[in-house]
Image (spheres, coloured by chain):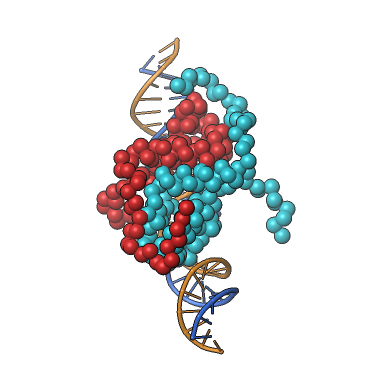
Chain colours: A red, B cyan, C orange, D blue
Amino acid sequence: MAEILDFKRTPEPLWREALGRKLRETREERGDRLVDVAERAGISVQYLSEIERGRKEPSSEMIAAVTGALGVDLADLLIGIAGQVRHHHPARSHFHTSRPTGRPSGPVLMAA
Amino acid sequence: MAEILDFKRTPEPLWREALGRKLRETREERGDRLVDVAERAGISVQYLSEIERGRKEPSSEMIAAVTGALGVDLADLLIGIAGQVRHHHPARSHFHTSRPTGRPSGPVLMAA
DNA sequence: GGGCCGTTCTGCTGGTAGCAGAACGGCCCT
DNA sequence: AGGGCCGTTCTGCTACCAGCAGAACGGCCC
């Protein structure tokens, strides 16, 4: 699926792209080569390359293996990615983009 | 019968599990039903249910569709997930688990 | 009882994750 | 020039799972 879309402009970067960018940044900060991380994570080097460039969609187990090989935990990684995404994303987040098709659907819980 | 292989334990929650938890929380805070979000996102109800329970691995496009239907952006979602993961995670950021196989790998670049 | 609603389970199929193997271009050596 | 390194990108190939339709389940109201 998803091949007939000619110009699917993504309003914000896709998850796999932001993830890959951050993984590469982390690896390069450590001074590691692709083969180093790939071996430690137990995956192939060409596949790690594709992950880092956002071309393939890694499973959760893959993400855990790579982050483990990089010595970071999931929470740190997510915060780092969020920072990158925000920066890419000049739109102010405090305009509630909510209510996409306006369906409050009954009892609107008041969230804290 | 699957008791022998209990050593599969993941030290920290998997990405898909943390993601699903946060998506369900966000939906419930909005007071939406599964069918509401699924229709807006253009996916099946059963599948959204599976995503929220962390049983299936959604693609980046799926994540974008669901977050769009929930009216949140990726950065906010990631930060929320990071908070949940951290909470689950009894502060073991002391010892850097880094250097898993201790391989500075030849010419040690000096990272900035 | 029966009907409605929300969630979860049971298949099924097309797509793709993930690998091996190799070739390629760029870069730094000598 | 040649030869290692390093990252990328081809061509496959197989096993697995995303994603769906259909229905069952359990609750609640009639």
For image coordinates 35% across by 37% down, the residue present is A87
Which residue is the extreme one toward the left? A6
For image coordinates 33% across by 62% down, the residue present is A102
Q: Measuring from the top left, give residue A103's x and y in whole percent.
A: 36, 64
Front position in the image: A37 or A21? A21
Q: In the rendered image, which quarter is residue B112 located in?
A: top left
Q: Is residue A87 above or below residue B111?
A: below
Residue A30 visible, this orientation: yes
Q: In this view, does D10 lie above or below B16?
A: above
Q: Measuring from the top left, give residue A110's x and y in whole percent.
A: 45, 58
Q: Is residue A59 above or below residue A99?
A: above
Q: Measuring from the top left, give residue A30's x and y in whole percent.
A: 50, 27
For image coordinates 46% across by 55% down, the residue present is A111
Front position in the image: B85 or C27? B85
Q: Measuring from the top left, give residue A81's x and y in whole percent.
A: 44, 39
Q: In the rendered image, which quarter is residue B44 located in?
A: bottom left
The N terminus of chain A is located in which quarter? Answer: bottom left
Residue B23 visible, this orientation: no
Front position in the image: A35 or B17? B17
For image coordinates 39% across by 37% down, the residue present is A84
Front position in the image: A47 or B30? B30
